[in-house]
Image (cartoon, helix red, strand yellow):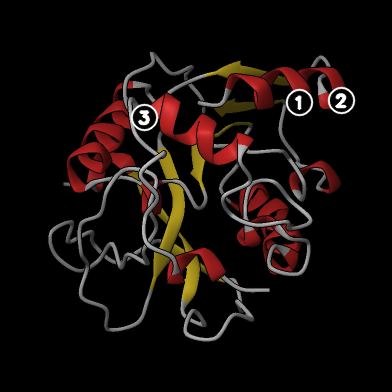
Amino acid sequence: MGHDYLEQPFPEWIEGSTEERFTRIYERRFWGPLESSSGPGSSLEQARVIMEMLPQLLEEFDIRSVLDIPCGDLHWMQHVELPVEEYIGGDIVGELVTRNREQFGRSDRVFLHLDMISSELPKTDLVLCRDGLVHLRYEQIWEALANFKRSGARYLLCTTFTGDRENRDIQTGDWRPLNFQNPPFSFPESIRLIDEHCPEEGFGDKALGLWELAALP
C-alpha cells in the first residue's frame, strides 16, 4: 500500500497551527487505513532494514541516548532493542504521547509532548528524525534544524532521498521527498547512509542519513 493520499488535493480541513494540523491528520487517519496510524513508512515491511541496522549504527558511534522525534505510534520501534541507556520519544500529537506512555513507557523509555520546531528539546547524543522534516515547510525545517543544534545533540539521523531530485516547498502537513544534499539545504556528504530499500514505486532512493549537527548549514 503506497502513499495514496499524495494523489489527493491537500484537504481544507488541515489548517491551523502545526500541532492542530498533525493532530487532525492523526485523528482523521488522513494517511489511510494502514497497519500504523503514522503512515505507510511506519509499516513493519518498510521499516525492516532500519530495524536491523539502527542498533548497529548506535553501537558503532557509541550513542547512549536518543531523541526520536516524531516518534509516532511506535509501531515498528517497539520491536527494536536499542543499545542505549535512554530513549526519548517526542511527538506533537498529545494523544499519541499519552498512548505511548501507557503502552510502552518504562524507566529507560519515556515519551514527551514536543514540537520539534519550537519546544525546548532534551539533550541526547542523537536526534532521530525519520519521516518528519519531509512534512514541513522549508522555513520550519530550518527552524527544526536550529532547534536540534540548540539541544546539544551531536548527531542527526534523518530521512533523505539520494536520487537526483529537485526539492520543493509544501504546506505544513503535506509530504514530499527531499534530498538534503541538494539546495536549498546543501548538506555535506553523510557520515553513514542506511538505504531503506523502500518497496514503494518511485521511492527506492529513500534512506536515513547520519550527520554531525555542527557540520550542517
Residue 105 left/right relative to 216: right
Q: Nearer the viewer, residue 10 or 86?
A: 10
The residue pinned by badge 3 equals 18
Residue 77 to residue 120: above or below: below
**Quadrant in the rendering for residue 151:** top left
Q: Residue furthest left?
A: 184
First-in-chain label (3 vs 2): 3
Residue 204 to residue 159: above or below: below
**Quadrant in the rendering for residue 108:** top right
First-in-chain label (1 vs 3): 3
Residue 84 left/right relative to 140: right
Whole-percent x and y of residue 194?
A: 55, 68
Q: Residue furthest front?
A: 12
Q: Amino acid at mark 2?
A: Gln
Name the disc covering residue 100, or none.
1
Secondary structure type for disc 1: helix
Residue 95 to residue 216: above or below: above
Q: CA distance from mark 1 to mark 2?
A: 5 Å
Judged by depth in the image, the label closer to the viewer, 3 or 2, is 3
Q: CA distance from mark 3 to mark 2?
A: 25 Å
Secondary structure type for disc 2: helix
The residue pinned by badge 2 equals 103
Residue 44 left/right relative to 90: right
Secondary structure type for disc 3: helix
Q: Nearer the viewer, residue 154 or 138?
A: 138
Cβ–Cβ below 8 Å for labels 1 and 2? yes
Whole-percent x and y of residue 63?
A: 59, 38
Query: How many marks do you count on the picture?
Result: 3
